Image: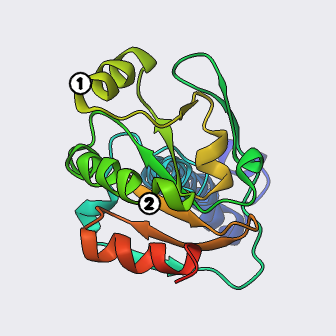
């Protein structure tokens, strides 16, 4: 008889059949969940990496101004040597910081697009005129700007001190520039005295000049 011709079916095996697809469905759900998490996390991680790259100590300021976040005066430990600085100037000469050893140096990082830099420019000019006889040297470092603009600006505003062009950001990295303007004060022995992050005023300038002028 047809009913007796087949082997008896095991009820346990029969009941287990419908559960075969469950592990596969669970794995698919897990995979979809992982992909969803990656889709959310990876763009955020990429943003963090890009942000860190833009704001690291060696990054160029790219239009930011230190004056936007207030003014900070940083002093250096005695004997801190000034980093080497060797740049081509606006007139094709050489700006070598080491060549000014024996004289106090005011080193100003600036750009023509930086409003606080423009405002403090006459102050630098007056300061140099007042202390030139005492040996003071004013040097400029042009950051993220074109030499043609800087030459025109210096000509119109009467700046006659050497200005080096930091085309590759070497000076920005060496001096750990944070923004513009920044002014570094170097003692005659070539060591760093202090720096002002932000716009100079007469009072701030006089306070930082005094130690390097021997007053």
Residue 68 position, x and y percent, is 24, 61
The picture quadrant where one finds residue 192 is bottom right
Residue named by callout 2: 131
State if disc 1 and disc 2 touch (CB < 8 Å). no
- What residue is disc 1 on? 156
Where residue 115 sits: x, y (%)? 20, 45
Give above or below for 123 relative to 146: below
* Residue depicted at x 47% and y 35%: 142
10 Å crowding of disc 1: few (<14), some (14-19), many (20+): few
Count of numbered marks? 2
Helix, strand or loop for disc 2:
helix
Q: Is residue 57 above or below residue 201?
A: above
Left or right side of 196 for 71:
left
Residue 39 left/right relative to 166: left
The mark found on residue 49 in the picture is none
Closer to us: mark 2 or mark 1?
A: 2
- 68 lies left or right of 16: left
């Amino acid at each position: 008889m047809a009913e007796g011709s087949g082997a008896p079916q095991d009820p346990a095996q029969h009941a287990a059949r419908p559960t075969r697809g469950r592990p596969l469905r669970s794995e698919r759900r897990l995979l979809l969940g992982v992909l969803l998490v990656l889709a959310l996390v990876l763009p955020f991680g990429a943003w963090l990496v890009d942000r860190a790259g833009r704001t690291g100590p060696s990054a160029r300021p790219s239009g930011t101004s230190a004056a936007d976040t207030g003014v900070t005066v940083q002093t250096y430990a005695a004997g801190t040597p000034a980093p080497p600085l060797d740049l081509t100037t606006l007139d094709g000469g050489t700006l070598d910081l080491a060549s000014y050893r024996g004289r106090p140096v005011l080193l100003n990082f600036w750009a023509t697009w930086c409003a606080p830099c423009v405002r403090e420019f006459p102050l630098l000019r007056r300061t140099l005129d007042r202390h030139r006889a005492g040996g003071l040297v004013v040097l400029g470092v042009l950051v993220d700007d074109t030499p043609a603009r800087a030459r025109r600006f210096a000509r119109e505003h009467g700046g006659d001190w050497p200005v080096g062009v930091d085309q590759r950001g070497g000076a920005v990295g060496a001096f750990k520039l944070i923004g513009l303007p920044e002014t570094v004060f170097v003692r005659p022995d070539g060591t760093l005295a202090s720096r002002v992050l932000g716009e100079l005023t007469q009072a701030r300038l006089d306070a930082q000049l005094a130690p390097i002028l021997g007053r």
